[in-house]
Amino acid sequence: MGNFKENNPHQVRYLILPFLFVFAIAGHGQDKKDQAFWDEFDQARLYIAKHNAGRSIKILEELHSKDTLNPNVGYLLGVSLIIIGKEPARAAKLFEMADANFAELWDNPGVGPPEHLFYYMILAYCRTGQCDKAQENLLRLEEVFNSNQEFLKDDEYYLIDGRKWANLCKEPTVKLLEVPERLVKPDLRVKTRPHKYSTYSTLYGVQVAALLEPQMTRKFDGLKNVEVYVDMHGVYRYVIGNFVFRSQAEKMLEMVKGTGYADAFIVKITDEERYPLEVVALDQKSPKSQIRGEVDYRIQLAAFKESMPDESARFYLMIDSISELNLEDLTLLTVGNYKSYGDAIERRNELHRMGFKDAFVVAFNEGRKVSLEDARQYLRRIHE
């Protein structure tokens, strides 16, 4: 069975799928006339292993057109579609074909052992609203883990994440985030406290989203006063209001839907199973914190704790105008200070051409690091 490897290039924990660089075709019963076909297949799964599913799709589409019944080609094509967030119904069909030929599936670099098929089927069925099928494949995934605990103990993230997706599937306002090109286990420090109620009566609110990964409430355009709750399964729910009378919640629901949140619905926030904990901080910041004032972009070269790696020290001998920024227990090395995202990208590309392939753009708001997405969304909004 494959094992996860943990990589930490920018102080973000990535759980990377098994990275087995074994591309030999011998032993699969293919004659020489098929060698070009399988060479292309190996190239496609190498792209997946290197977190470039977009490029793998182009190759796999061509291979699939040549052999529509090949389960390994279909499986990898389905995985690539799920990773980039496209055509989940088609991915589900490809997975079903692969499942019908499960014994022929290989242990694929970048995708893992054949049993990971059940995980990807959960995602495909959740995205297409087939919640019963998602639950069926969760049971299959759990059975695999229960019977192979020793071999799969390092792959447990698949089981945990699969449970979250399957259990969240029937949420009316589920926001199915794209599976990133690397399975990401968020390294956010989440601080919670027990959800205390102001009354023993039932309280109503309007839920606008349910997420598997916590986000700042500023992501919800047009909404304020959004509270964040998390349950024991790690599902984060975003709710407006704390109303004693349902009629009050109905009025709020009308307003929220009018703002563009058509799937919002009324909930009982005194439900201790779904709203047991209130999120009070994400990375030592309130989830309600907003971006205000100036935003600037910089290029991050490295991040480390007290001991500076040799590679980071060498940056000072090779790159001009490095700045140090202390961010909690980390020291960040950055260059530049750009008001334009385009200018930052140009500088990053220049550093890439110089050989610093790990350099990437980061955003800051009044001295604190914020996500690129939030920064760009904020700037678009104030310039409209």
Image (tube, helix red, strand yellow):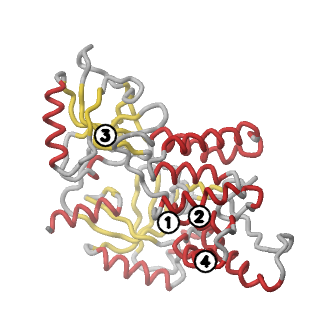
Q: Residue furthest top?
A: 200
Residue 127, percent across and down? 45, 52
Residue highlighted by disc 2 = 309
Residue at horizontal 43 percent and vertical 47 percent from the top: 213
Disc number lying in front (2 or 3): 3
Which is in the foreground here, disc 1 or disc 3?
3
Label 4 sits on residue:
65
Disc 1 to disc 3: CB gap under 8 Å: no
Q: Are marks 3 and 4 in contact (CB under 8 Å)?
A: no
Helix, strand or loop at disc 3?
Answer: strand
Q: Characterize the local packing of mark 4: few (<14), some (14-19) or many (20 or more) Cα atoms within 10 angstroms.
A: few
Residue mark closest to the camera, 2 vs 1: 1
| Residue under pointer 3 | 238
Tell which of 307 and 190 is nearer to you: 190
Q: In this rendering, would 350 be left or right of 57?
A: left
Residue type at numbered disc 2: Pro
**Is 83 placed above or below 59 here?**
above
The answer to whether the residues at label 2 and label 1 have Cβ atoms under 8 Å apart is: yes
Tag 4 near tag 2, CB within 8 Å: no
Tell me the element at label 2: loop
Label 1: which secondary element: strand
Q: Nearer the viewer, residue 278 or 205?
A: 205
Which residue is denoted by mark 1 in the rendering? 302
Where is residue 243 shown, x and y percent of the image?
A: 19, 26
> 10 Å neighbourhood of mark 1: few (<14), some, or many (≥20)?
many
Say which of marks 1 and 4 sits in front.
Answer: 4
Which residue is pictured at 42% across the width and 78% down the height? 348
Disc 3 marks a residue whose amino acid type is Tyr
Residues 276 and 337: in front is: 276
Residue 164 lies, with reference to residue 11, above or below; the image says above
Give the Cα separation between the discs numbered 2 and 1: 9 Å
